[in-house]
Amino acid sequence: MLETVPAITDPEAPRQIDPDSRGVVEFRNVSFRYEGAEEDALSDISFIARPGQTTAFIGSTGSGKSTIINLIPRFYDVTAGVILVGGVDVRELSQKELRSHIGYVPQKNVLLGASIADNITYGSPDLEQAEIERVAQIAQAAEFIEEKPEGYDFDIAQGGSNVSGGQRQRLSIARALAVKPDIFLFDDSFSALDMKTDAALRRALATNLTDVTLIIVAQRVGTIMDADRIYVIDDGRIVGSGSHEELLKSCKPYYEIASSQLSEKELVSAGTELAGEN
């Protein structure tokens, strides 16, 4: 392990993010293939995500949604094309510079064996108590925290085994919020939340994060239907893009996902005809 040479390395002369493009994420004709694979996991992916907007990705399991998210903080390098963050190719930024602008909440939420406050402030140890409580409130975690006798001093077991899956997700979101990044990456990070908490969290994010870039991967249509732009991923390709209402009418894969999760009344209320006929 100690002798392994990392595949991802910093450039010899790293650049800085352009202040005028702060928070902008752009994929230009990106393709990616995992090492040893015979086929690309992503093919010719292009999109722009901007501050003040929510950009969402949806698709079947294994379609490549999480791969898109994982390329942004440069966990892997693209096989072809380019990814720009803040107007700069991510390969021309130091990893520290790149990741200091990103708040990342992965599918599997890992908590430390420490207090709730220490978990929230892991990436921002100088955060004051008032700010800890504010980010917990936005993440919809404040209520269950304050119900505990120890409050923010409650000790989390290693891995978070003494809190529920939904509570782990909310604490992980609070931890990302505490860093105050330009870009938030949510990789199916609301999956363990009930619909009411999911909706309340999305409203709080929209209200409190008006000048940041939100990029969300989700399995549930309800989580992303209010996004400014939704991209439908199928077999590593973008097969549809637009608003929820536009995709119901124009993208059969999206309609099939939506119709399997929403009632006919909910589909009709979106003002759509059966996209399955298109």
Image (cartoon, rainbow, N blue to C red):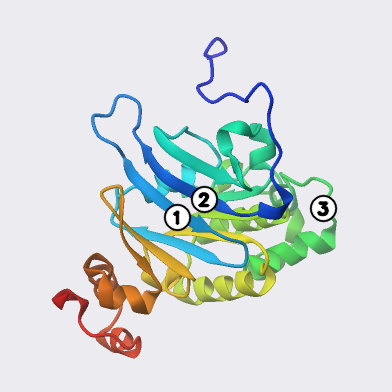
Secondary structure, mark 1, is strand
The residue at the far top in this view is 3
Where residue 228 sits: x, y (%)?
49, 71
Mark 2 neighbour class, 10 Å CA radius: few under 14, some 14 to 19, many 20 or more: many
Report the quarter where the C terminus lies.
bottom left
- Residue 51 image-quadrant placement: bottom right
Q: Indicate which disc residue 127 carries.
A: 3
Left or right, 210 with respect to 241, comes to right
Q: Indicate which disc residue 26 carries.
A: 2
The answer, for residue 141, to whether it is visible in the render is: yes
Proximity of marks 2 and 1: CB atoms separated by less than 8 Å? yes
- Residue 10 image-quadrant placement: top right
Please name the amino acid that badge 1 sits on: Phe
Proximity of marks 3 and 2: CB atoms separated by less than 8 Å? no
Residue at x-position 57% and y-position 12%:
2
Front of the two marks 3 and 1: 1
Of residues 202 and 235, which is closer to you in this image? 235
The answer, for residue 150, to whether it is visible in the render is: no
Proximity of marks 3 and 1: CB atoms separated by less than 8 Å? no
Secondary structure, mark 2, is strand
Q: Which residue is mark 1?
A: 47
Residue at x-position 76% and y-position 47%:
124
Please name the amino acid that badge 2 sits on: Glu
